[in-house]
Amino acid sequence: MFNLDNLKGITVVQMTKITALLLALGMAAGSAQAASSIDGGNITFKGAITTSPCGITADSAEQVVDLGTVTASKLKKGEEVRRTPFSIVLTDCELGTQKTAKVKFTGAPATGNDALLGLQGTEGAKGAGIAIMSDNNTVIKPGADSPAFNLNNGDNVLRFQAQVQRISDTAEVTAGRFNVQTGFLVSYE
């Protein structure tokens, strides 16, 4: 317990020094406390629980397939352009009676060729669309099922290819940028 009688005989100068010392100690304690504080942030966890026999990896569920630059002259001549591979990875498959998977791409078909995905968000690009092919080179029409993929327990990689194609032999191909978005659905049999 602090007693004021202990302060008798202390001069004003000594009291000022004691007060300054106590203030300095208080500020040092506050600085030490501030130095040990840590900045924070937020983390969002997202996912899904499914009754399907397989899950889909996050990288497969949200992906960008860069088709690069294709020359309009090649498309006009009907020449084959580069195919770009992509895949959908099914994970932790626990197969019962369902041993195969089919994939349906849900994007809008191109006007004039329903086998291709239509260009969207174009900055001038016209006369072409995107073909999606299964690993056996079968073109998968938008809204149609892919050929069946045989599955194994564990992880399975479903391989596809995408290619820019001219809509028809008479379509005018115009240079420019484009984006094409499509969803996909996996069904099991």
Image (cartoon, rainbow, N blue to C red):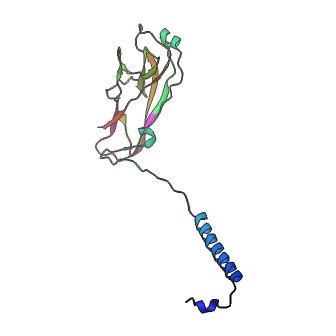
Q: On the picture, is 128 further left or further right than 20?
A: left
Q: Quadrant location of residue 98?
A: top left
Q: In this view, does 142 lie above or below 172?
A: below
Stretch in magenta = 87-107
Q: Which residue is drawn at 52% across and 18% down?
A: 70
Instruction: Give the residue drawn at x 66%, y 73%.
Output: 24
Of 128 and 89, nearer the camera is 128
User: Residue most toward the front?
Assistant: 12
The foreground one among 186 and 6 is 6
In the figure, residue 153 lies in which quadrant? top left
* Above-or-below relation of 17 to 34: below
Type of secondary structure dominating the magenta stretch: strand
The picture places residue 135, in percent across and down from the top left corner, at 43, 28
Residue 92 magenta-highlighted: yes
Say if 163 sits above or below 31 in the image: above
Q: Where does the N terminus fall, quadrant-wise?
A: bottom right
Res. 21 image quadrant: bottom right
Q: Position of residue 167 (x, y in %)?
A: 40, 14
Query: What is the count of numbered marks?
Result: 0
Residue 66 in the figure: left or right of residue 138: right
- Identified at 51% across, 56% down, the residue is 40
The location of residue 56, given as percent across then percent down, is: 39, 42
Is residue 128 magenta-colored?
no
Q: Residue furthest right?
A: 13
Along the viewing direction, whichever of 53 and 185 lies nearer the viewer: 185
At horizontal 64% and vertical 89% (from top left) the residue drawn is: 7
- For the C terminus, the quadrant is top left
**Outermost residue toward the top?**
170
x and y percentages locating residue 175 in the rendered image: 50, 15
